[in-house]
Image (spheres, helix red, strand yellow):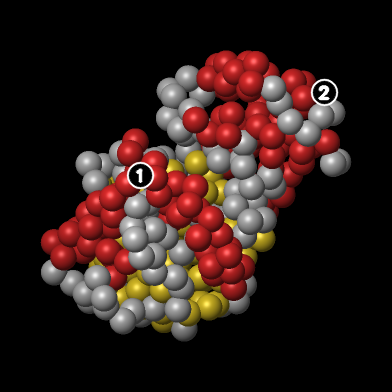
Amino acid sequence: MRGVALSTLIVGMIAAGTSIPSAANTALVHRLAADAAGIFANSYLVETEKGVVVIDGRLLTSDGKAVRARIESLHKPLLGVLVTHGHPDHYNGITEIVAGANVPIVATAGVDAVIREYDSAKEKQWASTFGAEWPPRRTFPNRIVKDGESIAFDGIRFTVHDLGPGESHSDSYWTTDLGQGEIAFIGDTVMHGVHAFVTDGHTTQWLANLERLRRRLAGAKVLYPGHGEPGGLELLNWQKRYLESYRAAVKDLAQGGTGLSEAQKNELVTRMKAVLPNGKLEFLISLGADAVATELAAR
């Protein structure tokens, strides 16, 4: 990885679900962001007093190795991995991250099912593109948690929230309180500052999920997205505007049809580049056009 690490210091201790400030337990949240080759996917490391918890595993073999190297640089053991959803850019790197260690790899049943159902197809679709950087063996969740269930590492409690379909066929997010208020690892419910993956065709549910998060996380201190910089509730507003713009453009171009011609897809790219001109993951614009046209035509 040639990405950037960002650390946010938060001090606290979780006991029986209650936040109790304590100088004895220090937790740092490190953001490790992939570069363009790794499609800008984030992994987060929560460094506790005695170990490290990873949220999401990034895409490439080198991405996973970079996360593992960062863990080793902290001189603390890996305690577990939490997975927000079943797209390869969030679990492919787990094999390198765990490096054979027997640690919990935790996800909801929905996220686990998506990974197992689509992993082979994703490999056929993308392995030739990424070559040796596509991990030949992927490591799947080994512990399943239910909506609202918590799991503790080094006294810090992480709670999962099942969202169902959204950016992927099954999304979730994780919350914790490290002593200065709730924070949330929201996966690709927000792809901040990059063009969105809409090919799974659930943009209606995705918009609904953004409203659910707005209500549920109204008091959250920080939202950590699957791509792009962390922030506050403004991240939800940003993603909503992007999705609404994309849906409006597809609806206008498709005129009730279930797909777009190549010329219409080129026009869609032009329109969405006006919404987000930085070009990050621009290839996703046309990739998702037919799926969203089909979704909108069925309404």
Say which of 216 and 104 sits in front. 104
Question: Within 10 Å of the Cα at label 2, are there few (<14), some (14-19), or many (20+) other Cα atoms?
Answer: few
Tell me the kind of residue under disc 1.
Phe
Say which of 288 and 231 sits in front. 288
Give the structural element (helix, strand or loop) at label 1.
helix
Q: Is residue 217 left or right of residue 228?
A: right
Q: Is residue 240 left or right of residue 29?
A: right
User: Residue at 50% across / 41% down in the picture?
Assistant: 191
Question: Please, is residue 230 above or below residue 212 in the view?
Answer: above
Tell me the kind of residue under disc 2.
Gln
Residue 43 visible at all: no
Question: Please, is residue 155 above or below residue 65 in the view?
Answer: below
Residue carrying label 1? 130
Say which of 267 and 32 sits in front. 267
Question: Please, is residue 100 above or below residue 284 in the view?
Answer: below
Point out residue 103 in the picture as x, y percentages from the top left corner. 33, 79
Q: Which of the two discs, 1 and 2, labels the residue nearer the N terminus?
A: 1
Question: Please, is residue 239 above or below residue 134 in the view?
Answer: above
Q: Is residue 26 left or right of residue 213?
A: left
User: Residue at 39% across / 41% down in the picture?
Assistant: 129
Point out residue 223 in the picture as x, y percentages from the top left corner. 47, 50
Marks 2 and 1: in contact by CB < 8 Å? no
Point out residue 125 in the picture as x, y percentages from the top left corner. 49, 47
Tag shown at residue 255 = 2
Question: Within 10 Å of the Cα at label 1, are there few (<14), some (14-19), or many (20+) other Cα atoms?
Answer: some
Q: Is residue 292 left or right of residue 66?
A: right
Give the structural element (helix, strand or loop) at label 2.
loop
User: Residue at 58% across / 65% down in the picture?
Assistant: 117
